[in-house]
Image (cartoon, rainbow, N blue to C red):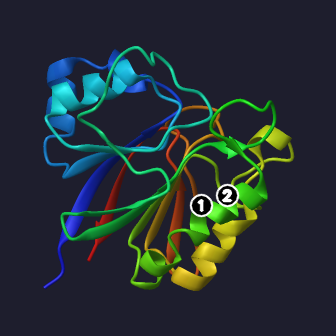
Amino acid sequence: MKKKYKILCVSDIDILSNMNLESMKNKFRDIDFIISAGDVSNRYIDFLVSTLDKDLIYVNGNHIYHKDHPITFAKNIDGKFLKYKGLRIFGLDGSKLYSHKEHQYTDFQMTCKVIKNIFSLWRGVDIVVSHASPKGIHDTDEKVHEGFKIFNKVIKWFKPKLWVHGHVHLHNYLAVQETYVGETRIMNVFGYKLLEIEK
């Protein structure tokens, strides 16, 4: 029998910190866990976990805010697999190289991160969490917001059920940017999105 998971996904803007706490607890009371696709502050991650009392899985974006605020309770899955609640989740942080700072990668470097996990990918993947998007899907022509080609190959070869990313800002946090490639649902979770996956 399949199980349905409800996931709160966030990225790029600490929008929920403006919500009334009781309203927030009520709105998200039935989620199974939280995913951050990067570029939110460590304090925001702490706030979400403290308020909702749920596990949080994350990758960093190309910016990390409030590094001095520890979030050791959260699960950083950059460059690795996590088996969680019956799901196989894979994470890839950062963006395209543009200023030679941390969490920026060339196509070759990102390909190497994927290759290191090739045997785990062959065993199946349910969710991929990245900060940047796949090349040509939700990205832009600006170097900083260009997607990675290797992500498209992961979708083609391993067919994850769900791919969540951030990095590309939408005109408001309620806007939806969603694409299907085969059976893979690719969602820009700028702001926050409530998503479901069944397995």
> Which residue is tagged 1?
113
- Residue at image location 24% in from the left, 17% down from the top: 20
- Count all numbered tags in the image, as a single digit: 2
Residue 40 position, x and y percent, is: 47, 28
Residue 79 position, x and y percent, is: 50, 56
Secondary structure under the numbered disc 2 in the rendered image: helix
Q: Disc number at residue 103?
A: none
Q: Name which quarter of the figure residue 95 lies in.
A: top right
Q: Is residue 10 left or right of residue 82?
A: right
Frontmost residue, 35 versus 112: 112
Q: Quadrant of the C terminus?
A: bottom left
Residue 39 position, x and y percent, is: 53, 31
Q: Is residue 110 left or right of residue 6?
A: right
- Residue at image location 55% in from the left, 68% down from the top: 116
Secondary structure under the numbered disc 1 in the rendered image: helix
Mark 2 is on which residue type? Met
Q: Residues within 10 Å of mark 1 (few under 14, many from 20)?
A: some
Mark 1 is on which residue type? Lys
Residue 134 lies, with reference to residue 7, above or below; the image says below
In contact (CB < 8 Å): disc 2 and disc 1: yes
Calculate the distance from the C-alpha at mark 2 to the C-alpha at mark 1.
5 Å
Q: Name which quarter of the figure residue 5 lies in.
A: bottom left
Q: Is residue 184 left or right of residue 89?
A: right
> Which residue is tagged 2?
110
